[in-house]
Image (spheres, rainbow, N blue to C red):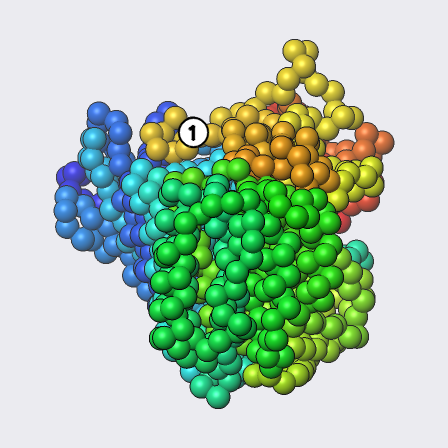
Amino acid sequence: MKPTKMLSALAVLAIGLAWASHARAQGMMIPKDHSIPALGIESHRVNVKIRDGVAETVVDQVFYNDCGQQLEATYIFPLPADAAVSDFALWVNGKKQKGEILEKDEARKIYEGIVAQLKDPGLLEYMGDNLFKARIYPVPAKGTQKVQIAFTQKLDYHANMYRYVYPLRTSGPSVSTEKDFTFTAKLKSQVPIKTVWSPTHELDVQIDGKKNAVVGFEKTKASLDRDLVIYYTVSDDRIGLNLLAHREGDGEGTFMLLVAPGNDIPTDEIVGKQVTFVVDTSGSMSGEKMKSTKKAFGYCLEHLSSDDKFNVVRFSSTTEPFFDGLVSASKKNVKEAVERLDGVNPLGGTAIEPALRVALEQDADPGMPHFVVFLTDGMPTVGETDPQAIVEKVTEKNGGRSSIFVFGVGDDVNVNFLDKLAEANTGAGDYARTGGDLEMNLSALWAKIAYPALTDVSLDIDGVKTREVFPTEMPDLFYGGQAIVVGRYTSTGKAKVTLSGTMSGSTKKVKYKVGFPDEEEDNGFIEHIWATRKVGYLLDQIRLNGESAELRDEVIALGRRYGIVTPYTSYLVVEPDMAPLTDGTATPPPPPFWGNVPGSGGGFGPPMATAMPEEAEAMEVFKSSKGDLAGADAMGSAAMDMSEMLSGMKDAEKVESKATSTKWASGRMFAWDGQRWVDEGFESSMKTLEITWGSEAFFDLVELRPDLEDALSLGTEIVVVVDGNRAVVVGTDVDGHPKKSKIEKFVD
């Protein structure tokens, strides 16, 4: 056969098994010679067009052959459920070649052969309704092979929400691109698009008007370790509200509400805001700090709208408001304020409480929201110097009327104090380290608060019982932004959600009807996000108010169950009831098949839940400063790291876990005990059935219990609970070849 000829073509392997979930893995190219690892991915580029819930996806992948010989290889690509291939092409000797469809009755035979020969549990994820395969020859030595596949699908749609999934790996060892992973999606809708959100990736989202949006993601040496999931909501309501839920069996459910005013600002609803800038001009602000502050301050003033009002309160040892009260943001007043601050020389001490009191005592218009933007670099040194007393006095004076946004400048900021001040006054804290870009920080805030849609917001759910809802207090809603609310629900059925707040100076109530399902196996990520937020809130309470045994134990339990790195669980190696190895350490799981592929990411990390160096330093600060608003441990770069870490956890919108000793799969947690992945629900008294990994019995188990697919793809050594008192033990060294009928009886 000539080298230029493809040995065989596209194979549509529609596996004739009742898999409930879609396949989840990127396309792979596997050499026929199985002693050679899977080929590395040079680049992976995806272009998607979605119109009213119908998506067309075009994928371009470039693989590289690191060997000194040309190869014959097999390309396989799994598709989401209900997707259909519209095009497939290979580049052979630089020329684009089409493929053919092979008989689908080869599916299980070919599939099982690949999995068993490669001894790669990650490939188990390829079991789906649509699996495509092509044999490719030649893949040039030290060269590349380009593949293009296009498919269409109708997106899942429920309650004004669409869901798009691009299949990437979600468990097992991850693969990384040598160059870029680029994803672009263009959305068009006949109904206004309210929000576009991903629980898996940090996307750049641009909503153009009401009915168009562009989504982008690009990363060099990207780890392809999870599906890329996009939700987008459509609604004619002024403020859209959508529900996602997850509930299995008779236990509690977890819900998520996405609340978004949309990006299109109704001209009759644009309401002005009132902003008071409280600016520290004490001696410690001299030099680059003052220069950056003046620049950032000028940016904010120049971006006030004509409907806004503002004032500036400069403080050091004394307090000086620039105007007698809040004034219109006219060009004249803005120019005067900028010139006055430019003329200020940083001198004197730091009198924080009087400055904030002046800002809050102004005669603000009750029909307009009032925001206080507070810039400072350090501790109070004049007047009231006890941070806790300042928080209490300012909060009492405020009475919930104004949101206080705090910006710490430099590396010697009292982080705990400023975070507590912001938290108690429905605001947020942010920090610009020495050499950082304060203007960028403030401009990011300005983008969020420029156009208030609903302020003094509250949310009520009537008809079902809910608990542990985060955030504990609803934030203000702004056009172009969104709020994500997560919580637990203990009863099911129809419910009425009432969103209340102030809009255009008057009280508004918007009511929505939603359904909390009895059972919903999808959306398991919600539980992770809920747990992360809860841990963030618990740690924040400990940091700012002090530790209690109850709070500490709850953080530990959640951290271990969901694999969340915390100051209490970050160095946990194995579960206490699991026997350690003889040297007292755990051994990492076996390396993946492609572990030595350049650019692949190289297999599993250490078996313990580890923190990055800066996180570890922040955790040490946490342990030293719990409940301390004034101590030295509440200051400095590490304290800022802890503040930012906890802020990210409290506002978590994505599933993230740095723990590698635990894995979440098939709706339960597994822990690595040094030899195998063990289901958290396993007890030694349970009846067990042994099954050899990769055997016919193993594939019978997967067919009979597709809900365990993710768990069974964790590795080759697994203990998984199949009901309340029985478990299956999977391994390479066990002699387990039971008949399918026996397996069915055991796991049913």
In the rendered image, the residue lying farthest to the bottom is 268
Residue 331 in sight: yes
Is residue 653 in sight in this rendering? no
Residue type at tag 1: Gly
**Where does residue 366 sit, x and y in percent of width and height?**
63, 79
The structure residue drawn at horizontal position 73% and vertical position 54%, both measured from the top left corner, is 392
In the rendered image, which quarter is residue 1 located in?
A: top left
Going by the image, does 608 lie left or right of 627?
A: left
Name the residue rendered at 78%, 45% in the picture. 723
In the figure, is residue 514 to the left or right of 277?
A: right
Residue 146 location (% of width, % of height): 24, 46
For residue 630, above or below residue 197:
above
Which residue corresponds to the image point at 24% horizontal and 50% vertical from the top-left?
Answer: 90
Above or below, 363 against 700 in this view is: below
Q: Hey, which residue is sitting farthest right in the picture?
A: 685
Return the x and y of residue 109 as percentages of the image width and height.
47, 43
98 and 110: which is toward the camera: 98
Residue 732: x, y in percent? 60, 26
- Horizontal side of residue 96 vs 499, given as left or right: left
* Residue indicated by mark 1: 602
